[in-house]
Image (tube, rainbow, N blue to C red):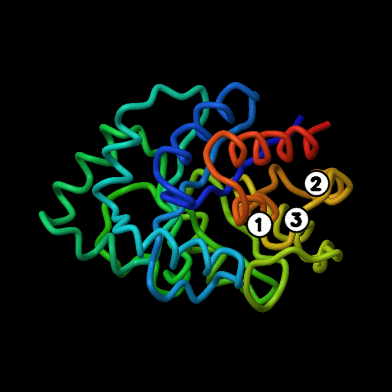
Amino acid sequence: MKDFLAYIPAGYPDLETTEKILRELSKLGITGVEVGVPFSDPVADGPVIQKAHTAALKQGMNLEQILEMLSRLSLNMDIYLMGYLNPFLNFPSGFAELKKFLEKASVKALIIPDLPVAEFESVDIDYPKVVFAAPNTDRSAIAVINRQKPPFVYYIPRYGVTGIRDDIPFIDHIRELKDKIKSKIYMGFGISTREQVEKVWEVTDGVIVGSALVSLMETGSGDEVVKKVVNKVRELLP
């Protein structure tokens, strides 16, 4: 089995459920989880994840609470923190203090959707960061990616926002990038079936599933939500 990452928005439907989901996913042998930091303007996300952000923010969810929760856990998988640039740059006690919290919470890297490759090296965030690639990634962007040596490259196979879809476009472009980029390449955006997972694995090093899991959290609560998410991940794995 190649790498598999699940995306889970922190605090949706509540932080206790988030913690339970992480503990259960850790038992499945997957590579890791992207823990989403709720934000008021998640421009890269579709309606399913936008709804989750809004609901979590209404409950007062913030970066400090998420990091405190993660620091309590001992998980058998990698944890990535996926959030927009503003909360990281404006952490109340400064980024130097944030870095300590990230390390204490065993966060492997940050994933920042609104940090384009062109600005990647000008933003002063001294922590491992995942770089995004897309169908329009050019030679100069590839050079930045290879200089940064990210834990993986997040390939976005379509123009637009996150959400469940049937197709997997730009397969040929991914194959081309695989010959030029030194880091692992994972694909996200629109993956919701085992057939899609297996097709993505044919051309990448890993797959990321988000909206297909978050949509299961819209109804139910507590252990019912945990069971839905865990069962869906099991369904997607070979």
On the question of residue 148 being in view, the answer is no
Secondary structure state at the residue bearing disc 2: helix
What is the crowding at mark 2: few (fewer than 14 residues within 10 Å), some, or many (at least 20)? many
Secondary structure state at the residue bearing disc 1: helix
User: Disc 1 marks which residue?
Assistant: 215
Q: Nearer the viewer, residue 3 or 17?
A: 17
From mark 3 to mark 1, how far is it between C-alphas? 13 Å
User: Disc 2 marks which residue?
Assistant: 197
Q: Given this view, does label 2 or label 1 mark the residue nearer the observer?
A: 1
The earlier-in-sequence mark between 3 and 1 is 3
**Left or right: 197 in relation to 110:** right
User: Disc 3 marks which residue?
Assistant: 191
Q: Which image quarter is the N terminus in? A: top right
What is the crowding at mark 1: few (fewer than 14 residues within 10 Å), some, or many (at least 20)? some
Mark 2 and mark 3 in contact (Cβ < 8 Å)?
yes
Q: Is residue 135 above or below residue 206?
A: below
